[in-house]
Amino acid sequence: MTNKKYLLIKIITVFLLVNSTLSGDILSNYRLNGIENIEKQMDANLMKKDYWDKYLNNVNTTFGYIESYSNILVCDKSLATLTLYIKDVNGSYNLKRKYSAFTGEIKGDKVKEGDLKTPIGIYDITKKISKVDSFYGPMAFVTSYPNIYDKYRGKNGSGIWIHGLPTKQVRDEYTKGCIAINNQNIECLDRNIDIKQTLLLINEKEISQNVSKNTLANILAQLYEWRYAWLYNDIKSYLHFYDESFIRYDGMNSQKFKTYKTRIFNKKESKKIIFYKINIIPYPNTDNMYKITFLEKYQSDSFTFTGNKVLIVKLTDSQIKIITEK
């Protein structure tokens, strides 16, 4: 018996012990159809919104549904602030520091190189640079601008940093698009964050907090409905989640993507697909856009992949539609 099947049998045994009224049906299903059928039944249960409603009941959703970030940085361009929130042992994000910040000379969302605007969006900190020109203070944190949604919308440019202030020069009270805080504060920030677990949210105004758990449960249920269709080769249901405006990160449009996926699904390969470290975050300055990220483990007869997955989805009449992915 493989380790996986042994573990699955243990899970089912515990499930039966705490759900004795269902044990007869599940045992009969196992007796007649085997472990794989029970596994499919569990995959189907992950598509149910009521499961996610209960799951989220005691989960902090201040900034969305977040599994993999311990630090949240929020830049409010209207108030010229950069605020640090740190996750506690109970999973709540508490305000740790609020720093005064300089942002781009021109208001609004960054669109192109040299427009002197600080972008609006959701970003990671990709690295720390300890040796920088004295104009940027003692250090700089590099952001992931432009992200997949920026590129989808045709935005360009690069080099959006969080950095310090000049140690030798005099500077204006604005930047060319970066976020600048004083040198004591950037050293404080450096002591308080793990850049691999830090999320940066930038908006023209205050970021809304306490995201609707009902909305998040709906998105999570549909995320697993999308996974179910993928897992069990239901191409029609799978493609239903993609918007007609979909363009993949590499430029593949909706029609070519449908053709490509149909060819793969027609192989009828057995698959294993597991999602870890899921994050669902409302996209700043929008009413119905969400960024979904997770670590995906995928295995089929012909292909194996483990890595990060990014979806940008819009909610249309409570239905998620994927507009781009990577």
Image: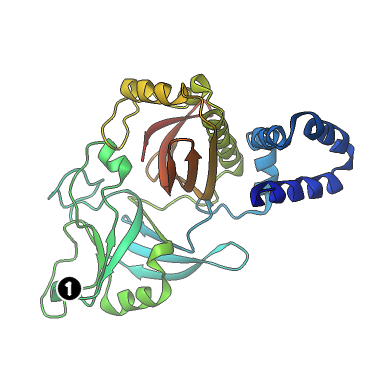
Residue nearer the viewer, 257 or 89: 257
Label 1, secondary structure: give it.
Answer: loop
Residue nearer the viewer, 170 or 294: 294
Residue nearer the viewer, 171 or 317: 317
Q: Image height check: is 99 above or below 14?
A: below
Res. 80 in view: no
According to the picture, the residue beneath numbered tag 1 turns out to be 132
Q: Image height check: is 259 above or below 81?
A: above
Identified by mark 1, the residue type is Val
Res. 265 in view: yes
Task: Report the residue that reaches farthest toward the left.
Answer: 169
Quadrant containing the C terminus in the rendered view: top left
Q: Residue at x 76, y 50 (%)?
A: 10
Quadrant in which residue 175 is drawn: bottom left
Q: Residue at x 66, y 49 (%)?
A: 2
Q: Residue 110: percent from the left, percent from the top?
A: 22, 47
Q: Residue 306: percent from the left, percent from the top?
A: 44, 48
Quadrant in which residue 183 is drawn: bottom left
Count the numbered circles shown. 1
Q: Residue at x 13, y 70 (%)?
A: 171
Q: Residue 322: percent from the left, percent from the top?
A: 42, 31
Q: Residue at x 39, y 46 (%)?
A: 284
Q: Residues within 10 Å of mark 1 (few under 14, many from 20)?
A: few
- How did the renderer colour the structure? rainbow
Q: Residue 180: percent from the left, percent from the top?
A: 25, 66
Left or right placement of residue 251 versus residue 195 in this view: left
Left or right placement of residue 77 versus residue 50 in this view: left
